[in-house]
Image: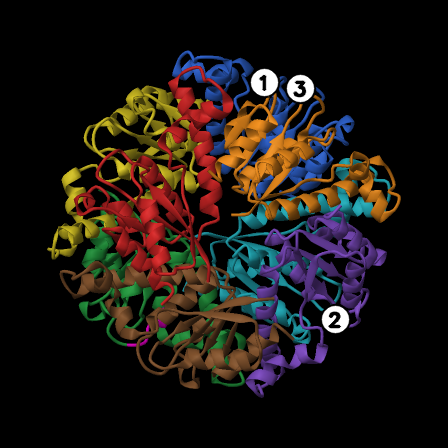
Chain colours: A green, B cyan, C purple, D brown, E orange, F blue, G red, H yellow
Amino acid sequence: MELTVYLAGQIHDDWREQVKAKAKEKSLPVTFVSPQTNHERSDNVGEDILGEQPDKTVKDDAASDINNFRTEVLMQKSDAVIALFGESYKQWNTAMDTSTAISMNKPTIIIRPESLVHPLKELSNKANVTVENIDQALDVLAYIYE
Amino acid sequence: MELTVYLAGQIHDDWREQVKAKAKEKSLPVTFVSPQTNHERSDNVGEDILGEQPDKTVKDDAASDINNFRTEVLMQKSDAVIALFGESYKQWNTAMDTSTAISMNKPTIIIRPESLVHPLKELSNKANVTVENIDQALDVLAYIYE
Amino acid sequence: MELTVYLAGQIHDDWREQVKAKAKEKSLPVTFVSPQTNHERSDNVGEDILGEQPDKTVKDDAASDINNFRTEVLMQKSDAVIALFGESYKQWNTAMDTSTAISMNKPTIIIRPESLVHPLKELSNKANVTVENIDQALDVLAYIYE
Amino acid sequence: MELTVYLAGQIHDDWREQVKAKAKEKSLPVTFVSPQTNHERSDNVGEDILGEQPDKTVKDDAASDINNFRTEVLMQKSDAVIALFGESYKQWNTAMDTSTAISMNKPTIIIRPESLVHPLKELSNKANVTVENIDQALDVLAYIYE
Amino acid sequence: MELTVYLAGQIHDDWREQVKAKAKEKSLPVTFVSPQTNHERSDNVGEDILGEQPDKTVKDDAASDINNFRTEVLMQKSDAVIALFGESYKQWNTAMDTSTAISMNKPTIIIRPESLVHPLKELSNKANVTVENIDQALDVLAYIYE
Amino acid sequence: MELTVYLAGQIHDDWREQVKAKAKEKSLPVTFVSPQTNHERSDNVGEDILGEQPDKTVKDDAASDINNFRTEVLMQKSDAVIALFGESYKQWNTAMDTSTAISMNKPTIIIRPESLVHPLKELSNKANVTVENIDQALDVLAYIYE
Amino acid sequence: MELTVYLAGQIHDDWREQVKAKAKEKSLPVTFVSPQTNHERSDNVGEDILGEQPDKTVKDDAASDINNFRTEVLMQKSDAVIALFGESYKQWNTAMDTSTAISMNKPTIIIRPESLVHPLKELSNKANVTVENIDQALDVLAYIYE
Amino acid sequence: MELTVYLAGQIHDDWREQVKAKAKEKSLPVTFVSPQTNHERSDNVGEDILGEQPDKTVKDDAASDINNFRTEVLMQKSDAVIALFGESYKQWNTAMDTSTAISMNKPTIIIRPESLVHPLKELSNKANVTVENIDQALDVLAYIYE
């Protein structure tokens, strides 16, 4: 059974590549999709496509239009979601994507360090599974195929 | 990831062919579907299939039955919608299809000239993205695959 | 049985007052709600509340945010929708609200002059009932209570 | 028309009391509901009700069970949501509640300071309206009744 | 707990009055709603409101518009449905209303004579309860209040 | 675009074979599915599988369990429904399947002879298209592919 | 805010009366509804209303028709569900009602003794809150009103 | 037409292998999926993946997180569900999965011995079909392909 999994979360390191590599090692028939991971492109895509905007707020809104379009298309095509929270940044998009996934009945795994147990407790409680690292998330995904 | 995109909007020029050609140039794995683009056929399909109708209103209703059947089948099979508004005609079918798509949670792009910013402002506000030309719409679509 | 009915449509004359007066004459236990009918207020509400915006497009978008918020709250509280189309203006908001209502399974009546039969044919076909004047719409509403 | 509005957001100051007082000044027929605003009670409610838990993670999860139960009951009864983001704290519950509300088609207003425009841009883009202070949020709410 | 119950079914005798009288005897706090029970009015309502139609098919369609509008409003307000099938007439509206109610998750009781067991077997199988007479239907309704 | 179409309706003649043959002539990429068309098997399948039942009503209910299971699986897999009504029999299953399809937002075509215009008027009004013969239904289906 | 709470679970002791009494002590504005708690009546209601059935299986099915009708009406009217599991009996109806409530997005509290932690672990995991006794369930309910 | 069928139920014998073998004999194009059938692995998967937990209740909850994640992914991909109840064990997961499937509109077959007719009567009443052995369940599945 082939599955598509959306990888929500920060875009400041290569964690998605690690997920893909480990899934390949385990020979899981899973296709991974994700938001735009080039941070600069993600911030500028509104102006890149629509041209210069009148101020920074409008520029941000134009980028958000397009980022949300992309996420909506890809999340609707997904069978499950893995969301990674790290120790830095506000990560409200990660919280937003995770909540949206849960509301859409997408089975959801949260990855977060122990230091975030307390601030993430309500979201964690609504997700299916919360783990601490990528290996554990892959173990959960692999469990579907046992 | 293969996607199906419904192209809502006026049927008075070949804008859909431009969309398809540009998507092909960009090698996007997208199948485009659309309403009946032969205007005369679209207006007459009720009488073409069901025979002469008692008056023009009934003729129009018979055609609408069949046009709406077609649109419903194709929009349900689509992953996203692009709706183009031009400067002429009432284009209520375009507004209807766009609203329906949004209500069905189909991610939606509106293409409209700057002259229509004001009258389309509420619909534009509900769509995911609004752009001014076909190239920009294709850029948004291509962004899914970056 | 008390009902709430949303009155979608143009805001250039007092048609909603006529609806309310005739409903009162017929003693129908119906509460009517509607979009902002003060056109200037509707266009300026974004800047009225949020302050000056960087350009006209952003001003329009700010107004739309608030107009759509209002419509969404009121339409969700409604048991049925009456949408009036006139001969002037683009009336895309009317088409949008009508389509949204139909997609939300709100029973819907369209009022439109005979001159609009053809351009409204597909939307008319999806609504429950299409009539030509306010009296007929009220007759349909009153029919629920017979 | 009486409405119920859920007030999502931080629980470190008395902003909800301000909302209620201003709504009263404007004579809006709105009932406001909210999460547990006593921070200590919110954190300890799991152990308060269920007794001592084996460690802090389990204690947090027990509290979350009950906080999420409360939020789910109250948000389902609400006609709209106002979510306030401040400059401190992670505020993932605010992001979670806002996303959930949007996914449930609850019309939603975000209040956030200008400094948060960028990190909140995608969530702001999905909400109906974003404002910068409580007065503006109340103006939007009052607009429903104009 | 007050309930609203839609009474679907034939309109050739006074069975709905019997239901109401028996519910009153049992002091059930139930409001009953129903389709138009004046057969002639139901058949002519399209022309009554919209004026003469070009032929009988269009006249029928005009009446159906308005009958379906009424049914949709009232069934959405109902907590349960009782549908009575008799031995005469095609009763496709009864079958349609019953199926629609079941699809809308309205708890549904069918009343039908023993002679109709076989032709109604699949619909009966999808309804919650099938009984043979009005007294039994009222007993089921009363059971909610025991 | 490949489509699956459910053929609801009477099982007393070979109309489904005609539909399939005509679709093949037109080279439509459509797969047709249907209820059990062997009438005796359909009536007896409960006892065939579960053994003798205590009386005819229970036998009918056992068959209905299995017929409804089949229909539910196949209709959920379908993109559209064609329902044929003939002049004989009660055909409540056809009315039930048509209503269910419409409630599930399956685009639906009704085929019925002119003699049935009046008794089917409300159901016809809710379906997308009503035609009088198989050729016309195939023309509507083919129109999707023009 | 007045709430309606469905009390699912065994009907072999007076636990529902305890719930009601304690809610009254706490002055909670909650209306409680429940399945038929007279066990004999619940088992016999099919024959009580419909007359003698051909065998015990059919008798059971007739009773279930009516019990499920009652539960469906009452659970749809409820804002939350409390489900109590005891140490005896199979209690599949309790498991069924709890799962149904969760699938319907009804916020749900499970009460179960410590001895049932293991066999109920997956259901407990899907409910909002699991507690060990009636007092704790009432504390959770009261927490909504703090 | 290829179908996916989820096999809910006890994991103490090889009944799923029998189902698969019999489906192969009948050449049914059906893919079967199921919960983790290795009982020990199912009970320990939480600690296996997440490490030692503070007590047995938390260990159980950790396992349930992952088991429920697996079930949710697989049941959403399924077109129908077969649930087997045996004479031993509490089998609340079977009752939970069956109810969830029914609430998700998954066509559902229950297999249970005659001894369980009474305690399963309400759940049985909500499922599409109830049979007594695996052969009968396969006969029902095969009936789709007749």
Q: Is residue A18 left or right of residue E72?
A: left
Q: Residues under labels 3 and 2: Cα distance?
A: 53 Å
Q: Residue at horizontal 30%, vertical 78%? A: D89
Q: Is residue E115 above or below residue E21?
A: above
* Magenta region, residue range: A89-93
Give the secondary structure at mark 3. Answer: loop
A79 relative position to A51: left or right: left
Q: Is residue F82 visible?
A: no
Label 1 lies in what chain?
Answer: E
Q: Residues within 10 Å of mark 1 (few under 14, many from 20)?
A: few
Give amino acid for label 3.
Tyr
Give the number of the mark in front: 1 or 3: 1
Question: Hey, which quadrant is residue E122 in on the image?
Answer: top right
From the viewer's side, name the closer residue of E23 and D23: E23
Q: Quadrant of residue C6?
A: bottom right
The residue under label 1 is: E114
Q: Residue at x 31, y 22 (%)?
A: H134
Host chain of mark 3: F
Q: Mark 2: which secondary structure? A: loop
Q: Amino acid at mark 1?
A: Glu
The disc placed on residue F89 is: 3
> Front-most of C72 and F86?
C72
Residue A91 lies in the magenta stretch: yes
Residue sitting nearer the eye, A54 or C61? C61
Per the model, the C-alpha gap separating discs 2 and 1 is 57 Å
Amino acid tagged 2 = Ile
Rendered-image quadrant of the C terminus of chain F: top right
Tell me if residue B60 comes above or below residue C12 in the rendering.
above
> Which numbered tag is attached to residue C11?
2
Q: Residue E56: where, in percent of width, then height?
A: 84, 35
Query: Mark 3: few, some, or many residues within 10 Å (few <14, many ≥20)?
Result: few
